[in-house]
Image (spheres, rainbow, N blue to C red):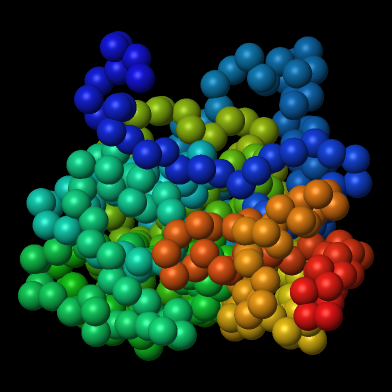
Amino acid sequence: MSRFWSPLVQQLKPYVAGEQLDLPGLVKLNTNENPYGPAPEVLAAIQRAAQSGQAGGDALRLYPDPQSSALRQAIATHHGVTPEQVFVGNGSDEVLAHAFQAFFRHGGPLLMPDVSYSFYPVYGQLYGIPCETVPLRADFSVDLQGYARPDGVCAGVVIANPNAPTGIALPLDQIEALLRLHPNRVVLVDEAYVDFGAQSAVNLLDRHPNLLVVQTLSKSRGLAGLRVGYALGSTELIEGLARIKGCFNSYPLDRLAQAGAVASFAAQGYFTQTCSRVMQSRDRLTQGLDALGFEVLPSATNFVFARHPQRDAAELAQALKAQAILVRHFPQPRIAQFLRITVGTDAQCERLLAALGGMVGTAQA
């Protein structure tokens, strides 16, 4: 540790992202990227934005629209809300960070599942927000009763739906029950994976001013490299996020990201098609893992969460890596024997299943 670090920096335990390797023939199934990439219209829009201006490329010397007006309009149109109900940021992680700052510093604990996106407690530590984890049930579903508190006692609730890394989704009636438990605190529903078979809570916005829905273009729209995320909520919640943004970074989304993101919402046919392909591949992958003796949790995401009763998950992950196949292993309590496996192309999934078949077959022989 450096003597120049503040006490806060010395205490932080940063989020650890999925491993990034550059290997020949790598099958990368550890960071939940979309195997099909963005729509062709998105690439064309980015190219036009880069070349616009009087001298070709001249636009890149100018700051982008700090309000991302065209993008907010496109998002609003897609979801049937007003642009004033939309906030955009540099990936959903930045949107989440601003939401933690804006809404959860009330002194009480912020409630979240004990098994969920591991960035949540990191933000809590960074911003001095006490966090209280609520255990998932034995089947890894959310236990709503665990979130019951006298109204105003907790700082709020953050929950991923579908949950990560389990992949399990809550139906809307349970999300609404959670909102009713805390009418005077923000309930943040992180919908990074909602487009792969879950129900979005966006339709609940009109009835619940305490609801903030966060989504991303990194997964279903194949734009992880552009870093675009957004929140949907009441105008007062969006204004709160804008105040934080205005004190942090006036230009979070660059010109190319805005252009590509707008185009992605126009390419609805491509979006629907690729989401369907991922879900079909997920079902085949689940069947293949089941045939190998894995327990696979029900998934409404672009990944599956699976464990084998006779093989250690960490050892399997290392053995797969030796064959240039990356999956994600979390050494935390309760899930240390699971692997989170991104749904790749059918060819990538077949290569994974073949490799696992060799490993599991050797263990069972």
Instruction: Say which of 179 and 338 sits in front.
Output: 338
> Which x, y percent locates residue 135?
32, 74
Relative height, residue 156 to residue 18 (above, below): below
Tell me which corner region of the image, top left, top right, bottom left or bottom right, holds residue 249: top left
Relative height, residue 120 to residue 53 (above, below): below
Report the side of 53 relative to 17 (left or right): right
> Which x, y percent locates residue 275?
73, 70
Relative height, residue 58 to residue 139 (above, below): above
> Which x, y percent locates residue 341?
68, 64
Residue that appears at 25% across and 29% down: 8
Tell me which corner region of the image, top left, top right, bottom left or bottom right, holds residue 126: top left
Instruction: Say which of 261 and 217 sits in front.
Output: 217
Figure label count: 0
Which corner quadrant holds the C terminus? bottom right
Q: Is residue 65 visible?
A: yes
> Which x, y percent locates residue 152?
9, 66
Residue that appears at 65% across and 43% down: 19
Q: Is residue 99 visible?
A: no
The residue sitting at the front extreme is 365
Residue that appears at 8% across and 75% down: 150
Which corner quadrant holds the N terminus? top left
Residue that appears at 17% across and 58% down: 109
